Amino acid sequence: MTLLGIDLGTTSVKAAVFDDDGVRVAAARATHPTARPAPGHAEQHPDDWWSGLTEVLGALGPALVGVTAVGLCAQVDTHLFVDGAGTPVHPAITWQDGRCGAVAATLTERLSSADRARRRGGIGTVDASHAAARAAWLAEHRSDAWVRARRVLAPKDWLLERLTGTAVADPLSSTGLLDPDGRYPEWLDLLVPGLRSMPAPLADPASVAGETTGAGGLPAGLPVAVGTMDAWAALLGGGIAAPGDAIDIAGTSEVLALAATPGGGAPGIVTFPSWRGLHVHAGPTQAGGDALTWASAVLGVAPAELLARAAGAEPGRVLFLPQLAGERAPLWDPDLRGHWLGASFATGSAELGRAVLEGVAHAARHVLGPLESAAGCRPESIAACGGGAASDLWCQIKADVLDRPLRRTAERDAGVLGAAMLAALATGRAASVGELAGRMVRVDREFTPDPRNPRPPRRRARPLPRCAAGTGTAVPSARWIGSGRVPLAGRRGHRLHRTPAARRRGTARHPRRPAGGPARRAHRPRRCRRLRRRADRRARRPHPARADLAPDPGRVRRALHRPARRRRPRRRGRAPVPRAVRHLGRGPARRAGGRPGPDPGRRLRCHRDGPRLRRARRRRRRRRRRHRRRRRGRGGCRRRTGTGPVRGAGPGAAASRRPDRRRVRADGHGPVGQADPAPARRPDRAAGEGADGLARDRTARRARRRRGGSGGTPRRAPPRRRGPGRGHRRPAA
């Protein structure tokens, strides 16, 4: 008596026959293509799925004779729209497809806060792989297909309908479509009208959906379990049966899962409903084995050959970001893209291949932290399964990066084994998941972290260095794997941020300082340090209206150290001096009147001591302004004539040599208060005279003298003003 497990994956269809102890009797697989008609699109045709299934069933041949039950699992977040007869109206949109990102953002805005909190799975948003986003996109861009569509099915549901004639969904695969009560919510119709009635009816994954009809080469009359997603089936095939058990599924994408007690959760982590005593948190990434396949195609090397070359490369030389088609957990951003960083002329295919392996391992490490926060526990070891687990090198890299022992299962295709275990549960071959796991799951090899290989530091990063103030954006370096160095880009440059151990070794240095010297703190005045500490305190204080946003210390620091600049108005009556002849110091050439002329050595001195000369120019300008203000306060500019005062003489001598010119009549015939022999006249407004008949400026006095006035009309002394010294100009009368 044997069990048949079928796994409809992203790249192939796999099937295997197992006995009651989990020993593989026979296995076969067939690949199917993925079409990418446009950037961000990823489609598969169901006819390729069915052709692959019939091929693997024909390859099993005689091994199907003793099969007593069939279990299914398939890729998740792949949606197929069919008509009433089950015929596809559009190719299946796979989980790798990111075309619906913009549509998903608009759908998320339609959901209320309560509906987001009640969305099953704990993500709280409608992402690009949600069935509602796919339905809205199809209605907008493929209206003819949307008019004919009557149902939306997962690949497992469509395959189940082809084998048994009945399409049945399960709560685990439909997590994003259900509310906490395990039903299709009403807000699906609010997002897309009519969407709530399109998915298949729900049933327990370990229940019998129907019997085979003889389609595809299977014998008729075999019971077929409802089945579930491939990731959950891999959990069962990897031996996850109790809280604290963790697994790394190295398939087309890297998926980490951790069993825990009911409750918990974390942002970006999918929380599945409890099923038969298992409460699981999972973090699916976007890239895994698919990244290795892409790198092999780009480099023109087979995957096996690339793995062999990567084994001889030095670790940590090149950094690879595996977000080739966006990222799922924990970021859920379809717009991210991958990079190779740190490559040089000495970089070859071996270094690039090892960088791909390390990049996927670090993506798994990125998920492990939020996963442990969601579960509230730290696993002591992690089970490893999937096609990527067949490489000893990759398993060792993951054990070093995750800093956990990695237990590789004997059955690499854990999803196929998990589907067979669901068939055993559906037909009553076992009473619990723990019993099946203890009987059918075995460990092949254990990989422990090697202390000689680099691992990321456990300590949290310290605050930003002084020269890294600004946005605080982290830009990974080529050697940050294991060394703990992360250059931080900022407004004043960057400095290598090192771990405490690296600082004790004395290897941290500023990029502008020659190598070999110890790191020193840049000198800053005490007042700047006080302002900086004050800015840090303000930045850490949350804003009452924006409590959900992280504080930006660079914004406060820039406001303190970069005051607003004022433009000084240009003086009237003087044209701007061309930059080529502008004089900063006293040169040998002089103009008429003793003013300094162009300095031929100015350009050379500007490179050497330009700041010093600019400070001298500002001091001269301030002295000239102070001198002008003092002369205005004493009654304006006077000509040196024979009637002026004599310095050092007494009051009598001054009075005998010059008249009182502080207040002079408008006609210029004597001081104010004396009898006026001439008749009174109206003030001359054209000559600049005021209401009291006094001339206001030097131009008006000259006009009076040209008309025959005696002695001119000096300007009336204005009151002393205390305005801003720099750039101040007295308003015109």
Image (spheres, grey):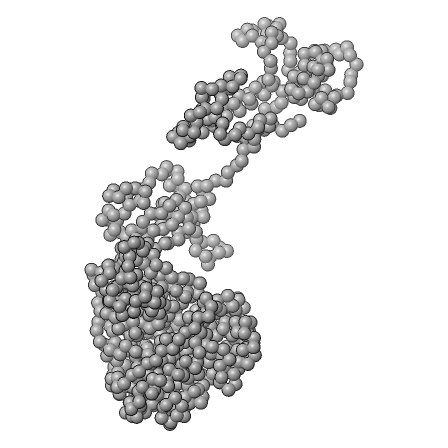
The picture places residue 662, in percent across and down from the top left corner, at: 64, 15
**Which residue shows up at 30% across the image and 42% down it?**
513
The picture places residue 209, in percent across and down from the top left corner, at: 41, 88
**Can residue 426 be seen here?**
no
What is the total number of numbered labels drawn onto the structure image?
0
Q: Is residue 303 left or right of residue 698?
A: left
Q: Is residue 2 left or right of residue 167?
A: left
For residue 313, above or below residue 277? above
**Which residue shows up at 24% across the image and 60% down it?**
313
**Can residue 679 be seen here?**
yes
The picture places residue 321, in percent across and down from the top left corner, at: 35, 61
For residue 412, above or below residue 112? below
Rendering quarter of residue 325: bottom left
For residue 397, above or below residue 61? above
From this viewpoint, which residue is outermost toward the right? Answer: 679
**Which residue shows up at 44% across the image and 25% down it?**
600
Quarter that holds the C terminus: top right
Q: Is residue 215 left or right of residue 67?
A: right
Rendering quarter of residue 647: top right
Q: Is residue 474 left or right of residue 676?
A: left
**Which residue shows up at 26% across the image and 68% down it?**
305
The picture places residue 636, in percent across and down from the top left corner, at: 60, 19
From this viewpoint, which residue is outermost toward the bottom? Answer: 221
- Residue nearest the viewer, comparing 576 with 125: 576
From this viewpoint, which residue is outermost toward the front? Answer: 300
For residue 258, above or below residue 464? below
Quarter that holds the N terminus: bottom left
